[in-house]
Amino acid sequence: MRVRPAGATGWPPDLEYTLSVNETLPPCPECSSAYTYEMGALLICPECGHEWSLSSADSESGAEDGVIKDSVGNVLADGDTVTVIKTLKVKGSPSGIKAGTKVRNIRLVNGVDGHDIDCKIDGFGAMQLKSSVVRKA
Ligand SMILES: [Zn+2]
């Protein structure tokens, strides 16, 4: 437990300001303080003294902070309309989803198996697609 003494810290005011106001850092997992700051590879909470590393969490979550891109690299967003670029087999459907099928109002999800788009397709109903088989319309 390391608590910064209240009052005179000896830190220059501007340094304290930059350490405190960093909205890109996650809150402290121990006490939910928003005033976490970075020191090297560690994140440090000035409220309860908890220190932890972000790098392991980063490598687990994969690339680019959850940005989902279509087959040609366009960034997708909720509500986008996309076109399916190749025929997809669907259980119980003789024809499957044909290439060129438009899918409206997609919703990005963190699905299983790389299925990161939740949508409804006319004639098929709700299903999940992979962003790698669509292209932003
Ligand atoms: Zn804390």
Image (cartoon, grey):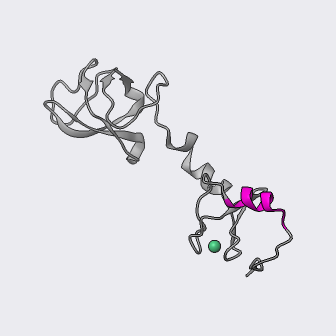
Judged from the image, the quadrant occupied by ligand 1 is bottom right
Residue 46, quarter of picture:
bottom right
> Residue 8 at x, y = what percent?
82, 76
Q: Does the magenta-highlighted stretch encompass residue 16? A: yes
> What segment is highlighted magenta in the picture?
11-20
Front residue of 132 and 93: 132
Residue 109, quarter of picture:
top left
Residue under the image location 55 percent in, 49 percent down: 61
Say whether residue 63 is visible. Answer: no
> Residue 74 at x, y = what percent?
46, 25
Q: Does the magenta-highlighted stretch encompass residue 88? A: no
Residue under the image location 78 percent in, 80 percent down: 5
Say whether residue 108 is visible. Answer: yes
Furthest toward the top, the residue is 100
Name the chief secondary structure element in magenta.
helix
Instruction: Say which quadrant the C terminus sits in.
Output: top left
